[in-house]
Structures are given as C-alpha cells and as structure tokens.
Amino acid sequence: MIVARPVAPERAAGNPGTGEKKTMNDKVEPSTPVRTIIADDHPLVLLAIENLMMGYPNMQLVGRAADATELFREVDRIPCDLVFMDLYMPGGLCGDGLEAVRQFKVRYPKVALIVLTMETQAAALRKVIALGVDGLISKRDRIDLLHVAAVTALARECYLGPAVRALIADATVAQRLDFVRQMLSRRELEVFTQYAAGLGVTEIASRFGRSVKTISAQKCTAMRKLNLHCDAELFRFAVEHGVITEDCLKNRR
C-alpha cells in the first residue's frame, strides 16, 4: 500500500532529447489548478494521496470515490483534468478492473487517467497499458512519484512507475530464457550456461564427466541453434536472455 512519508518531491523526467525539466506549469497555469479525483477502496490510500496533493498548490482535489461506479458518477458530476484510480476495487457495476479502465477511457478520453495497483503479473500490467492509460504505478513505489506521474500524464505521455517497469522487464527476460530452454537440450543448456559463466571447455568436461570433444560439440550445436557466430555474441545473448547475469559477465572480465 502507498504510505506517505517525508521525501523530497521528485521532479518529472526531462523532455525526451533535452535537459529540460517538466513542471506542472508547462501545461497548466497556476491560476487554473489541476482538478483531480481519486478513487480507491482503502481510506488510508485516499488520505495519503490527499496529503500529498496539499503540498502542490496547482493541484485541487475535487472528488473522491470508493469504487468504479462512484468514480464515474463523480466525473459526470464534476469537471476534472486528472483521475487517480485503483485497478481493483470491490463493488461497483463495471466488472473487473480492466473493464472499468476500458470503460473510463471510452467515456472520458480527455481526462488523464493514472492507475494505481498492487498487481505483480506482467501480463496483467501490459493489458492495462494497452488500454491507453496515461500512467500506471505500483502502490509499492514512493508516494511522491504520483506527482511525477501526474505531470507526465498531463503532458499526454504515459508514465510507468519503477516497480511496474521492473516487473515487465523481469518477465521479458523470463520469456527469453524459456525460449533458450525450448531451443536447447538439457545437456546443451548446461554447457552453454557454464561456458557463458566463464568456464572453459576443459573445465566443463571435467565438471560433468564428459570428453572435451563432446563438450565442444554440444557448445557448437547450441550456438548453431541460437544463430550465434562467435563467443562475443554468445556472452551478449546469455545476458540478454537471462542465462547469466550482467554481473557474472563483468566478473568474468
């Protein structure tokens, strides 16, 4: 759960290709605060976000909701620029979290939507992103990143929190590793992994009780199956596909 704690508010990332910093005032004048609605079924989360917003005079809380149905009612009742919405809220008439997000984007395309979640499955996170949300942030991230997400979303760029990015990246590496396992036999994978980790053919042969000729042949077969033509390609491929870590490769050097 997002918990408020004293941290220095992080500024939004610079505009792509420049060193320029974004601020809320890039899109909204101080005289026109960003009208914000927050929706979450946990009162402590609502309170934490409210407390955060109090530190930003150009953000104005205009509504609260505890489920998607109540959120839609609030957006219909009060004009707003930005919504923070929990992905999974019990109750309501809008189905599961993904369906609620889909309906929101259809009904309110001009309102920036930032989704908050405890979801850890990369596939589910990708589905949320595919619905066109303006931000997706984990409740495990620092609360001050909500302001960064708001600035980015109002600039019509999609903000992904650090935890979300890490979960998706880790899942991508896991999928790549599954590909390697499907392509190679068990013994070829053993040899490939040991060689990528820094052992020589002779050392691997001694470790597994096979001949040097057999180990060399299994290494060459693995490289051919993976379309690798030299050791440099092998080492780079092994890191990119999660066979070994980058630290392991650095230690090898």
Image (cartoon, grey):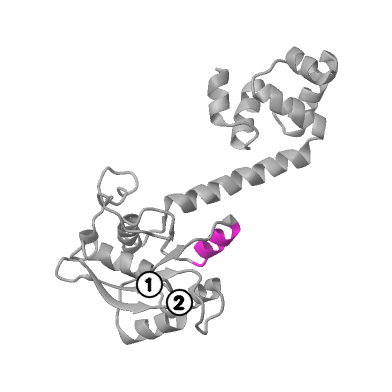
Left/right placement of residue 195 relative to residue 38 reads right
| Residue name at image x 51 percent, y 67 percent | 131
Residue 126 on the magenta segment: yes
Residue 34 or residue 86, whichever sits in front: 86
Q: Note whether residue 224 is visible.
A: no
Task: Name the amino acid, label 2.
Answer: Phe
Of callouts 1 and 2, which one flags the residue occurring earlier in the amino acid sequence? 1
Residue 195 sits in which quadrant? top right
Camera sees residue 122 = yes
Residue at left 66%, top 27%?
234
- The secondary structure that most of the magenta stretch takes on is helix
Q: Quadrant of residue 121?
A: bottom right
Residue labelled with disc 2: 104
Q: Please report the bounds of the magenta region as a residue range.
A: 123-131
Residue named by callout 1: 43
In the shown orientation, is residue 119 left or right of residue 52?
right
Quarter of the image that includes the C terminus: top right
